[in-house]
Amino acid sequence: MAAAKKILTPEKEMSFLDHLEELRWHLIRSTLAVVVIATLAFIFKDLIFDQIIFGPKKADFPTYKLLCKSARALGLDSFCFTELPFRIQSRTMAGQFSAHIWTSITAGFIIAFPYVIYEFWKFVSPGLHSNERKNARGFIFAASMLFFAGVLFGYYVVTPLSVNFLGTYQVSDQVFNDFDLSSYIGLVRACALSSGIIFELPIIIYFLTKIGLVTPQFLRKYRKFALIIVLVVSAVITPPDIASQVIVSIPVLILYEVSILISGRIIKKQKKKAKVNG
């Protein structure tokens, strides 16, 4: 019994200032990890820009090839082109250098995300019970995989749909699309990161359920409102056409249903634990 109490007791009592100091070092280590990877991304400029950033601008991008084949199978000619009718330009002296810096930082954050999550978990784990700490590896893995899946979905689905729609849209033949470098990169970055964050929905629901703010009954009751919110979010991160919004909303709705199952399992475990303790 004494051993059990010892396990459940925090390693040490820390003052508010001690917690702030601990948080500061977690933030420093996370920032250093992002900076190190960002430096590598800065060095491999050709790979980051020519192959990744400007990939959705090329006609041979995998998404366009797949959509072109699908359209032709239906007797259509959508997404079949040799070149998108727009150019990318930099109109400021430091435009390209600034884009290089911020794109490298974004790449650093995306790649270092598992370590950032690990540092976050190390900060909050001392306040958890020993059995909850055992789930650390599973939490870090799940959060990282969901984030990477979201980023890939944003890059390979949301980005090409947005680039194709906005890059070919014209109010008149008299207007030629010349997009600023920062505008184009901002679109790619927003599509990838916003999708990565949206895919963290099951993790968010997990923590909200653990602290008692959300229940599976609540999620089921407001499913219709959640559908509206998902469609609004899809409209924000995609071009204003129905097909793109539906494509983006499908995985988010699936994640919502998965979140209900996760919330239900947590509530079930909590009730079982309370019954045993009672």
Image (tube, rainbow, N blue to C red):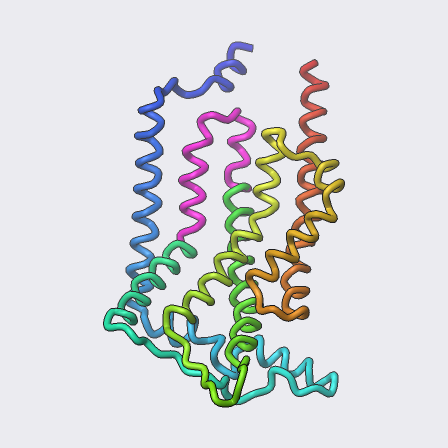
- Tell me the residue at 35%/38% (across/down): 26
- Tell me the residue at 68%/22% (across/down): 273
Is 154 covered by the magenta stretch? Answer: no
- Where's the C terminus, which quadrant? top right
Q: On the rendered structure, is 249 left or right of 121? A: right
Report the predominant secondary structure element of the magenta stretch: helix
- Residue 267: x %, y % from top left: 69, 31
- Residue 40 position (above or below residue 82): above
Q: Which residues are magenta?
A: 112-138
Q: Nearer the viewer, residue 33 or 189?
A: 189
- Residue 35 position (above or below residue 214): below
- Tell me the residue at 38%/58% (across/down): 106
Q: Nearer the viewer, residue 3 or 218?
A: 218
- Residue 220: x %, y % from top left: 75, 42
Q: Nearer the viewer, residue 40 or 200?
A: 200
* Location of residue 233 by image quarter: bottom right
Q: On the rendered structure, is 4 left or right of 185? A: right
- Where's the N terminus, which quadrant? top right
- Residue 76 position (above or below residue 166): below
- Residue 234: x %, y % from top left: 61, 60
- Tell me the residue at 54%/15% (across/down): 4
- Residue 190: x %, y % from top left: 47, 61
